Amino acid sequence: MYLSKQKRNFLLAMALGLSAGLATSPAMGQQQGEHPHEKQKWPQATLQAEANAEIAQDTVKITLAAELSDATQTAVADALTKTLQDTMAQAKAGAKGKDIQISSGNYRIWPMNDKDGKITNWRGRAEILMESTDFVAASELAASVSDRMPVADLRFSVSPQKRAKKEEALLAEAAQAFRDRAKALAEAFGYAGYSIKTVNLGGSGARFEAAPRMAAMAAGKASMPLEGGTEMVSVSINGSIFLHSAQKSTSQQ
């Protein structure tokens, strides 16, 4: 059968296009996010490992507070603002050259009502927040301004820098524990080894504070030694693995 040159070129182009499509289809299947081991139908297992450490709290957060009352809202606002400004100036002057951060806290004014709902007077509360890793300096500074704004609350915590450093060390421990557990699991079920499919990282912390010392300082105006508690920091790793046989059977291929 005689075919024109134009028709032969058209049929050749169609054949080449079909061949290219067939050649690229397997690669497209691998781009769908399939794990190469999933097609081989190896058994899978999920497991978790964890590393923990108890670390000392190295940061204290002190709340100074003043509460005032007067007949009018304006009178309370003026007196509370003056107390806050004077105390803040004194605290910042005392904190110069020391590792103490000072900032304003809550500030609010509210009416006091009698049983009939009538306003009898006004009350106000202002706070100053201190944060430091130097417990001695923070205690002395809080005591120096306690005549204006006494300590209302204090809490201990672990600084972000110290926590991050400890979590970095715990991550290495948790990762090794995960690998050890995966290897032990594979051996326990008679498999030659494993490969990791997915890994998820988690963590948590529990705080233990020295509550009796907190109450003692909050109740008094004199400087006293501060002693923080401890926190339990943990890093956990959970994930899934493929279990490998020494020689793949026909059903696994």
Image (spheres, helix red, strand yellow):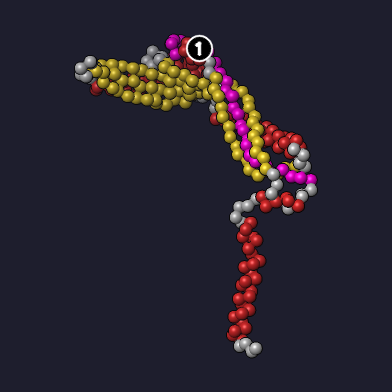
Q: Which residue is mark 1?
A: 212
Residue sitting nearer the eye, 61 or 112: 112
- Location of residue 225 with respect to 163 vertically, above or below: above
SS at circle 1: helix
Q: 221 left or right of 184?
A: left
The segment highlighted magenta reads 218-246
Q: Residue at x 31, y 20 (%)?
A: 124
Farthest bottom residue in view: 2
Give residue 167's position: percent from left, percent from top.
61, 31
* Viewport quadrant of the N terminus: bottom right
Circle 1 crowding by C-alpha within 10 Å: few under 14, some 14–19, many from 20: few
The reply to whether the magenta stretch includes residue 240 is yes
Q: Residue at x 71, y 37 (%)?
A: 182
- Left or right of 206, for residue 170: right
251 horizontally vs 54: left or right:
right
In depth, the one of 13 and 233 nearer the eye is 13
Amino acid type shown at disc 1:
Pro
Quadrant of the rendered structure where residue 67 is? Answer: top left
Find residue 15 and report its image quarter.
Answer: bottom right
| Residue 73 can be seen in this image | yes
Q: Is residue 165 visible?
A: no
Kindly identify the residue that appears in the image at 64 percent across and 60 percent down.
Answer: 27
Residue 198, located in which quarter of the rendered image?
top right
- Residue 149, above or below 247: above
